[in-house]
Amino acid sequence: MGEIIKRKKHVTSDDVAAVAGVSRWTVNRAFKSQSSISANTRDRVMKAAKELGYVPDLLASSLASSQSNLVALLLDDFANPHKLVVQEILIKTLRANGFDSMLINTNGEDDTEEAFLTASRRRVDAVILIGSSFSDNVLKQARDAKHHKKLIVFLRRSNVEDTVPICVNDELAMSAMSAYVADRGYKKPYFIAGPQTHSAHLSRKETFVNWWKANKGIDIGCSSVSEYDFNLAFAHVVQLFKNTDRSNLPDVVVCENDILAFGAIDALRYGLGLRVPEDIAVTGFDDVPDASRPHYDLTTYKQPLQIMANTLVRVLKGQESSSGILEFEGELKVRGSA
């Protein structure tokens, strides 16, 4: 019978059911990761489906069940290597739990509304925002349009109601970094931040500045770059310190993330002829793969990405509360740059 069915142009679930010796409904359940079906029956269905070349119609299935098991990842920052790490962990974790993902690039805030519409046309179960240009206004518009069952802000905070922020606790993280820098004897820190948008945001700069004011009575210097970009960070640090007398230079530059720290280290070494860490130490945040390489040997703060990804899956499955901010504590990674 299998050979006869395989000659058909369009193989249906009824065809698979006939070969596997089960009902059409059993075939449908076999392709749902959370359905109640024995392993032996599922194996028979999958064997028959493979033999016949059957692929379930996911769109029809989502229309019938109101769940697509598809999520959209909206990303606006491909220059940051940390985002590649985040994508890999999220996609693998989602797939292991029965969710497929689609990646949508957004080119700044003006493009974000169209990205939301693109996601909604695919009937996704959730939109996950991973980036720096998602303003409160955009989040409110997306929430009010009610195109998505869940609106998740990953790696950043959001105070917009009905969004689900999943992020590291920046206050704990930067307090730990501040205490470490102070304990190592640094007395003149300088902070370099990323984009200063009124949006789903980080509070690393504020925490670091406030810690030094409260604990050491010091108003530290700080500045920002418009994007998380190596070349921008390099040029920014050279411009900042090229005319500064050595006695007035900071003794440590604390960066909001690792890509800024990489730019700062290379600017100090190759743009200004200084030594790291002997003349100026540098710290970062995220612990991307290059951070541990000998060239940078970067002291940084590692986010618990796998734990956060697992939490995101529980939110999608309704197993985790989606009210309030879901925050996590990471780990300070001490290396040779500071």
Image: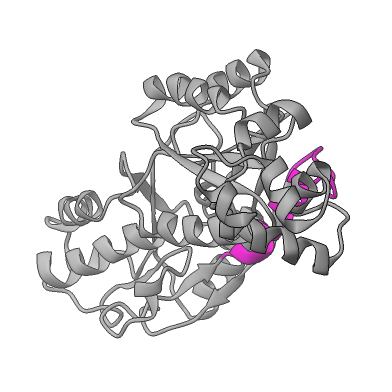
- Which residue is depicted at the point 16% across and 50% down? 239
Q: Position of residue 220 (x, y in %)?
A: 43, 54
Q: Position of residue 240 (x, y in %)?
A: 21, 51
Left or right: residue 13 compared with residue 219: right
**Can residue 320 be found in the magenta stretch?**
yes
Magenta span: 303-325
Picture quadrant of residue 292: bottom left
**Can residue 111 be found in the magenta stretch?**
no
Q: Position of residue 14 (x, y in %)?
A: 72, 41
Left or right: residue 317 compared with residue 9: right
- Which residue is depicted at the point 68% across and 53% down? 98
Where 106 sits versus 244, above or below? above
Residue situated in front as seen by the camera: 17 or 98: 17
Colour scheme in the image?
one colour
Total tally of numbered discs in the picture: 0
Residue situated in front as seen by the camera: 32 or 322: 32
Q: Quadrant of the N terminus?
A: bottom right
Q: Quadrant of the C terminus?
A: bottom left
Picture quadrant of residue 303: bottom right
- Residue 90 seen by the camera: no
- Which residue is depicted at the point 68% across and 18% down? 146
Left or right: residue 259 compared with residue 26: left
- Which residue is depicted at the point 37% across and 44% down? 77
- Residue 134 seen by the camera: yes
Residue situated in front as seen by the camera: 48 or 298: 48
Q: Position of residue 22 (x, y in %)?
A: 82, 52
Picture quadrant of residue 144: top right
Residue situated in front as seen by the camera: 21 or 266: 21
Where 77 sits versus 65, above or below? below
Where 86 sits versus 322, above or below? below
